[in-house]
């Protein structure tokens, strides 16, 4: 098949990394894969092409060079590239689907898909989009894909439709980069003892990811005399709120910014922390499993579908500080209780990009 994967950019986010992984695996399977992005530059930022270096050379990359904001050129450039490429499949990610509305309305040869990378109510943009989306979903002019069962449930509730297909998120297995030794040495320098547990949090700074709770819990552990290192990796901590959070953090919490070799940090860490107040099915959680890094997460979105408490990670009872503190304590009381190989085998069976891409191909060809 000739397949277009279409998204906003390749910025440093889980959905963007998923798109790259899916493109690579579809190309490996022998399909002609085109990755189309609206832009590879953001105003005052340089990370809109953050994940581009991960693209396989067999994936054909197209940048439409559309500036930020609502632009007519986003529609015209999108229609032009799709007509030019004449694909069998157009698969949209995030909220780029308005730009394919005109073609999806009248082109019966191309099959159009849209992945909701979050809860349905969080995956819409402009005011009246819900009703327009519903029309395209209901008529199957654009087929909807949910990344977890909880996202599918939110789709049914929000759109009053029951036709979304659930394909669990997938990720390529993490491997060490050429910077692994340097990364390991960096982390060892943070620790004054070889027995320090190393925690990692990978996410952009945002209300959704609830980093204030994370920092409060680890500050409390530090006040109680517990030794640890918490590595915070992600963008957008340079905002006023992000800077305030850093100032309030204890010295054992290290803010490292975005890292292209995040694999190495996962492979060096003992536990992965996520304190979100809502989620779809976070790619960072799958990365942790792939690295054999024990997840400690809040029970939101698709996370409880992935983590079997005490077996493949630890879940707090809710999103309160006290509950998450107790979840972290459970790990600290027995840090070797969950074996790395168990987590890696669990990932390979259930959340590999090979399994995920295979399910996408089956959906693409299904009548």
Image (cartoon, rainbow, N blue to C red):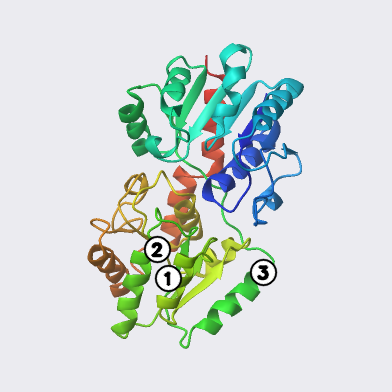
Number of numbered markers: 3
Percent coordinates x, y for residue 123 in the rendering: 44, 37
Residue ranking furthest to the bottom = 192
Mark positioned earlier in the residue sequence (1 or 2): 2
Please state if 343 lies on the left or on the right of 46 as rendered: left
Q: Which residue is mark 2?
A: 211
Q: Residue under circle 3?
A: 179
* 106 vs 323: above or below: above
Packing grade of label 1 (10 A; few <14, some 14-19, many >=20) is some
Of marks 2 and 3, the one in the foreground: 2
Residue named by callout 1: 245
Q: Helix, strand or loop at disc 3?
A: loop
Front residue (pair 324, 38): 38
Nearest to the eye among marks 1 and 2: give it.
1
Q: Are marks 1 and 2 in contact (CB under 8 Å)?
A: yes
Q: Position of residue 126 (x, y in %)?
A: 47, 33
Task: Write the residue at 46% across / 22% down.
Answer: 132
Where residue 238 sits, quadrant-wise, is bottom right
Q: Nearer the viewer, mark 3 or mark 1?
A: 1
Q: Residue at x 34, y 38 (%)?
A: 150
């Amino acid at each position: 098949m000739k397949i277009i994967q279409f998204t906003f950019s390749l910025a440093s986010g889980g959905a963007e990394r998923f798109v790259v992984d899916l493109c690579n695996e579809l190309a490996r399977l022998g399909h002609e894969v085109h990755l189309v992005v609206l832009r590879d530059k953001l105003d005052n930022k340089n990370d809109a092409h953050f994940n581009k270096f991960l693209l396989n050379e067999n994936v054909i990359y197209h940048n439409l060079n559309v500036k930020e904001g609502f632009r007519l050129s986003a529609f015209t450039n999108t229609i032009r590239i799709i007509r030019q490429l004449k694909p069998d499949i157009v698969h949209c990610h995030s909220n780029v689907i308005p730009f394919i509305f005109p073609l999806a309305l009248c082109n019966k040869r191309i099959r159009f898909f849209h992945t909701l990378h979050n809860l349905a109510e969080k995956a819409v943009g402009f005011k009246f989009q819900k009703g327009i989306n519903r029309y395209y979903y209901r008529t199957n002019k654009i087929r909807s894909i949910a990344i977890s069962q909880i996202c599918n449930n939110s789709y049914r509730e929000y759109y009053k439709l029951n036709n979304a297909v659930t394909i669990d998120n997938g990720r390529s297995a993490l491997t060490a980069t050429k910077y692994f030794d340097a990364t390991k040495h960096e982390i060892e320098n943070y620790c004054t003892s070889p027995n320090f547990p190393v925690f990692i949090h990978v996410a952009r700074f945002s209300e959704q990811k609830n980093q204030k709770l994370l920092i409060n819990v680890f500050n409390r552990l530090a006040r109680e005399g517990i030794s640890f290192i918490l590595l915070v990796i992600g963008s957008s901590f340079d905002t006023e709120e992000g800077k305030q959070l850093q100032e309030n953090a204890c010295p054992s919490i290290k803010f490292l910014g975005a890292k292209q070799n995040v694999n190495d940090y996962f492979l060096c860490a003992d536990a992965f922390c996520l304190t979100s107040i809502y989620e779809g099915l976070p790619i960072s959680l799958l990365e942790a499993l792939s690295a054999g890094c024990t997840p400690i997460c809040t029970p939101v979105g698709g996370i409880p579908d992935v983590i079997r408490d005490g077996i493949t990670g630890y879940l707090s009872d809710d999103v309160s500080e006290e509950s998450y503190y107790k979840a972290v304590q459970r790990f600290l009381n027995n840090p070797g209780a969950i074996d790395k190989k168990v987590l890696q085998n669990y990932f390979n069976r259930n959340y590999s990009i090979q399994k995920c891409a295979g399910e996408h191909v089956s959906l693409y060809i299904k009548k």
